[in-house]
Image (cartoon, grey):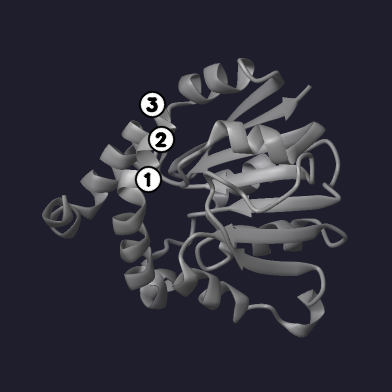
Amino acid sequence: MKALLERFPERFARLVTEAVVARPAAWRLFRPLFRRQWDKLAPSWEQLRRPDTFDPYLAGLDALPQPPTRALDVGTGTGGGALEIAARFPTTEVVGVDFSPMMVAQAASKIIPTLAGRVSFRRGDASSLPFRDGEFDLVAHNNMIPFFDEVTRVLRSGGHALFAFSSGAQTPIYVPPERIRAELERRGFSDFAFFSRARGTSLVARKR
């Protein structure tokens, strides 16, 4: 499995995504290798990102009926998604969480004085988020494996979940919108909206 990761990182990411969405408990098997991969990528991640990477994510943010009071960016990496939320909604408190300590360190280095106290980053696993039930009005993902039970748990009633994939179905970490909708409907979500922007797609839903 390590050899597959080193030779075909995109294929490995797709394999892990499909396995974990089908069986979340499988994450325990893949997590150490995945963390090692993202720790290794952290110093160069900004250079690998395309200019339109967050376009689908922003389409989802623009569709929210009102600014969230408190937002969570899951799998924040070097913090791009969290900072986009902060820029879109100047009064929103934003937390970015990632399981890679190297990624979190990179993200934390971007907190300029005007964001201090409103934007924070911390280490945490998406399969077991270190937050209370109903703590957020928005739980957002960009190119991230979703753990639907945890999204539901930390999102308050009436809050929104956002799932964006920067290259649509070609994104290495990708879940089809039909699968996301089916998983969320089983957990009491409604008001689904689908967006296509630049190379990618996004989906927003509200927790009833």
Rendered view: 95 above or below 180: below
CB within 8 Å, label 3 to label 2:
no
**Residue at disc 1, secondary structure:** helix
Q: Position of residue 111 (x, y in %)?
A: 68, 78
Q: Give the image quarter of residue 191.
A: top right
Give 66 or 33, whichever is nearer the viewer. Answer: 33
Q: Residues within 10 Å of mark 2 (few under 14, many from 20)?
A: few
- Residue 49 appears left or right of 180: left
**Residue at disc 2, secondary structure:** helix
CB within 8 Å, label 1 to label 2:
yes
- Residue 31 appears left or right of 189: left
- Residue 120 appears left or right of 142: right
Marks 1/2: CA distance? 6 Å
Residue name at image x 56 percent, y 38 percent: 163
Residue under pointer 1: 28
Regarding residue 72, the answer to whether it shows in the image is: yes
Q: Residue 22 got which mark?
A: 3
Q: Position of residue 14 (x, y in %)?
A: 29, 40
Q: Position of residue 118 (x, y in %)?
A: 81, 68
Q: Residues within 10 Å of mark 1 (few under 14, many from 20)?
A: few
Please, what is the three-letter code of the amino acid marked with disc 1? Arg
Rendered view: 58 above or below 175: below
Residue under pointer 2: 25
Q: Earlier in the sequence, mark 3 or mark 1?
A: 3
Rendered view: 29 above or below 65: below
Give 170 or 24, whichever is nearer the viewer. Answer: 24
Q: Residues within 10 Å of mark 3 (few under 14, many from 20)?
A: few
- Residue 16 appears left or right of 193: left
Please, what is the three-letter code of the amino acid marked with disc 2? Ala
Residue name at image x 71 percent, y 51 percent: 131
Please, what is the three-letter code of the amino acid marked with disc 3? Ala
